Image (cartoon, rainbow, N blue to C red):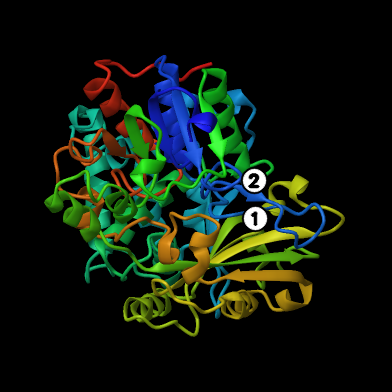
Amino acid sequence: MSAVVGREQDVVVVGSGPNGLAAAVTLARAGLQVLVLEAEQTVGGGARTLDLGMAAGIRHDICSAVHPMALASPFFTAFDLEARGVELLTPEASYAQPLDAEPAAIAWRDVERTADGLGADAPVWRRVFSMLSAQHEAIIDVALSDKRSVPSALLSPAALPALAAFGAMSGLQGTPAWGVPLRTERARALLTGVAAHAIGALPSLAPSATGMLLAALAHAGGWPIPRGGSQAITDALAADLRAHGGRIITGYRVRSAADVPPARAVLADLPADTAAELLAERIPSPLHRSLRSLGHGHAAAKADFVVNAPIPWRDAEVRRAGTAHLGGTRRQMADAEAQVMAGRIPEAPVVLVSDPAGVDPSREVDGLRPVWAYAHVPFNDPTDPTDLITAQIERFAPGFRDTIVAARGIPAARMHEHNASLVGGDIALGALSAWRMMARPTAAWDPFRLGASGWYLCSSATPPAPGVHGMSGWHAARRVLQQVFGVRHLPSLAG
């Protein structure tokens, strides 16, 4: 190990997902010697884009493909992805909800255009999301906080009406009262589909709050897709880290704490229970049990396709959206998620689909293009999802099967094979509920610090919540700077 790593480090980061790299960049910019250890051969964790060997020149996004937080996250705003050459392409429609018996409901970037397609619910959608999108920065300030300090937005009188509206709508849509105030199936399905980004029972508060946040961002800056794939975000972070003296070693798997070289601080971009096992002999038993108690939520099973034409949606307007939520009506989606919660695979699961070449023509090579999709399934389910996902796409896009040149399914039970953090297909790195959105991974005042071991957790298992936003890493880095190195202010991320 010493021959590879060299001298003792100031900081070691285990895992190079967006949160691990956000922490590493922040600490390197503070003048510390930072080493990142990554088990895979390429950096990025879930934010990678790789040639899977399915067709010459076609690259697939490994986990995340569309990035609602890339324009909104305070970390990425400070880091300024576009100034670093990351081209964020924003489709005119953020997401779409195809329906069986009528045209799809579409969430356009423009609130008015969206409302115009929602019939009797147009006034409600217009009123709520005009307010929320106008104050999206305040909502993000609260939603992506560390859940332990008071966000500045809560002290702003101008932001309070929007924050109150966000809380009220999240509460209504997360309880049996979710029929209020939306009355039409189109609007209800449109909001339910985006809520399903958080895999869980419908209705419940964690999916509801997630849906309201993502819907507000859909009408603010939109949901961008990085030109060339998610790897563009990762590469920008890695380049900045190296420019400030940081190092990355790939193909280095940490199986125990003994595999980590000496350092004043170690940050783990890992699931909470994985960190607990690594530190089993270094942390108190109550903390070990508490970390493991976060558990795992239900799962995603993924399918990658190579197709020879755009997805032939029955409603051609769906092509204008970067993401399609497949599941039909609100009731159909709720029933499908209930089956997942009961440990069964639904016949028609909730499926998320993106055809990135629709907004990024560079993803098409010799008439072929990638399609990214995942289905909600029970935790650690071993079933290949390819047929289920294909059937659900075909339901709303007849003829899709005929466009498929190659397909590859990854069961939930095997998601960890390309990213060790995705245990059992749990892409949220822990159970999601209203309580667990706050108490991630524990209810401790400092949820990032792993006892007195010198280790910190910086993954999506910590506040604020899952997502490619870098905020968990940024929050953890701030604590490391203060508690280990006596640095009270975060360094600038600009330039």
Of tags 2 and 1, the one toward the viewer is 2
Q: Position of residue 239 (x, y in %)?
A: 59, 26
Quarter of the view holding residue 469: top left
Q: Is residue 264 visible?
A: yes
> Residue at the spot x=54%, y=43% of the render?
44
Q: Position of residue 128 (x, y in %)?
A: 34, 49
The secondary element bearing badge 1 is classed as helix
Q: Position of residue 164 (x, y in %)?
A: 21, 44
Label 1 sits on residue: 320
Q: Is residue 136 visible?
A: no
Badge 2, how many Cα within 10 Å: few under 14, some, many 20+?
many
Is residue 329 placed above or below 193 in the rendered structure?
below
Q: Tell whether label 1 touches label 2 (CB within 8 Å).
A: no
Q: Is residue 272 left or right of residue 321?
A: left
Q: Position of residue 59 (x, y in %)?
A: 71, 52
Label 2 sits on residue: 229
Quarter placement of the C terminus: top right
Label 2 or label 1, whichever comes before in sequence order: 2
Q: Nearer the viewer, residue 6 or 484?
A: 6
Is residue 316 placed above or below 16 in the rendered structure?
below
